[in-house]
Amino acid sequence: MTTGGRWQCTSCETPLVGDFCHACGQRRIQGRLSVGEFFADVVRRVFRFDQAFAVTFWRMVRHPGRLADDYFVGRRAGILDPLQYFISSIFVQLVIAALTRALAPMVGRLSALAWLGQLGGVVAVKILLIFWMATIWRLLFRAKRANLAESYVFATYVFGTTSLLWAMLPLIDLLVPAPLGANVLVVSAVTLGIEVLYASYAIANFAKIPWFASFARVVVVMVVGYGLLTIVVGPGSMVSLLLPPMPPG
Ligand SMILES: [Zn+2]
């Protein structure tokens, strides 16, 4: 909106200097909404399949400790905040699961479906699991490096990255010559292995502790964390959570 040649905020009428209102944060709006803008907004804001998402993933692979530090001190331009990153990683899983369900019968590779048991699920439940594991970590090991909130942030980034690594598994199964997912033990060992090894690597990098110390702590936290959950929800639900069911047919 412009008055006398000057732009002003459409929400609070503060004169605008840049593309965002410094008083209320409203983005500068000009002209009417187009379908293209609307869908660009959905992709950018709801799914966050953009450069910031790719950068966050790549930095969590290369140097997770440095990404966490940048977030803690407020250098957050160009990366996603932890919850947005985690939610986007679940969207990626859902897209890849749908793709795998469509492609696997076409290329005669039903073993790829075996990897889908770990993908998707209820985002809210998964986020509670992150808080659960991070809290157990804090109770067992005194973290000098981070306070409780920072531990939650880092754990959310780690679980988001694990989700993305898991999402690659059905695609790998579709591409390589051997049907990897045909063996349920391979599926369990690989998914659990990725979770334990990536978390150990990320925590060693973040907390600046030796790799084997990080690995041992991750194993202890998972045994305690999943163990207590098994007692609470029962072994049946836990097995279906940890061991993906075999594909039908
Ligand atoms: Zn405003």
Image (cartoon, rainbow, N blue to C red):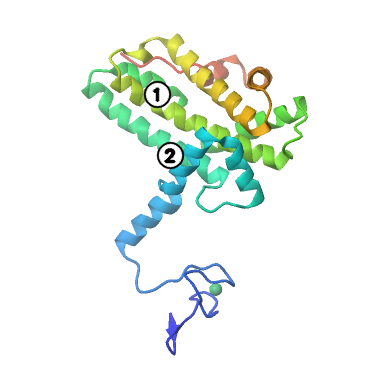
The label nearer to you, 2 versus 1, is 1
Residue placed at 32% from the left, 28% from the top? 100
Quadrant where the N terminus lies?
A: bottom left
| Vertical comparison of 20 with 197: above or below | below
Pointers 2 and 1 in contact (C-beta within 8 Å): no
Local packing at callout 1 (Cα closer than 10 Å; few below 14, some 14-19, many 20+) is many
Residue 249 lies, in percent from the top left, at: 30, 13
Closer to us: 82 or 36: 82
Q: Is residue 3 visible?
A: yes
Secondary structure beneath label 2: helix
Residue type marked 2:
Phe
Local packing at callout 2 (Cα closer than 10 Å; few below 14, some 14-19, many 20+) is many
Residue placed at 46% from the left, 43% from the top? 55
Residue placed at 40% from the left, 14% from the top? 246
Secondary structure beneath label 1: helix
Left or right relative to 146: residue 193 = left
Q: Earlier in the sequence, mark 2 or mark 1?
A: 2
Q: Quadrant of residue 114?
A: top left
| Vertical comparison of 159 with 197: above or below | below
Dot 2 beta carbon under 8 Å from ligand 1: no
Numbered mark located on residue 17 in the image: none
Q: Is residue 127 visible?
A: no
Left or right relative to 102: residue 128 = right
Residue 176 lies, in percent from the top left, at: 30, 18
Residue 19 lies, in percent from the top left, at: 47, 69
Residue picked out by circle 1: 169
Residue placed at 68% from the left, 18% from the top? 220
Residue type marked 1:
Leu
Q: Label 2, label 1: how many angstroms apart (C-alpha)?
A: 16 Å
Residue picked out by circle 2: 91
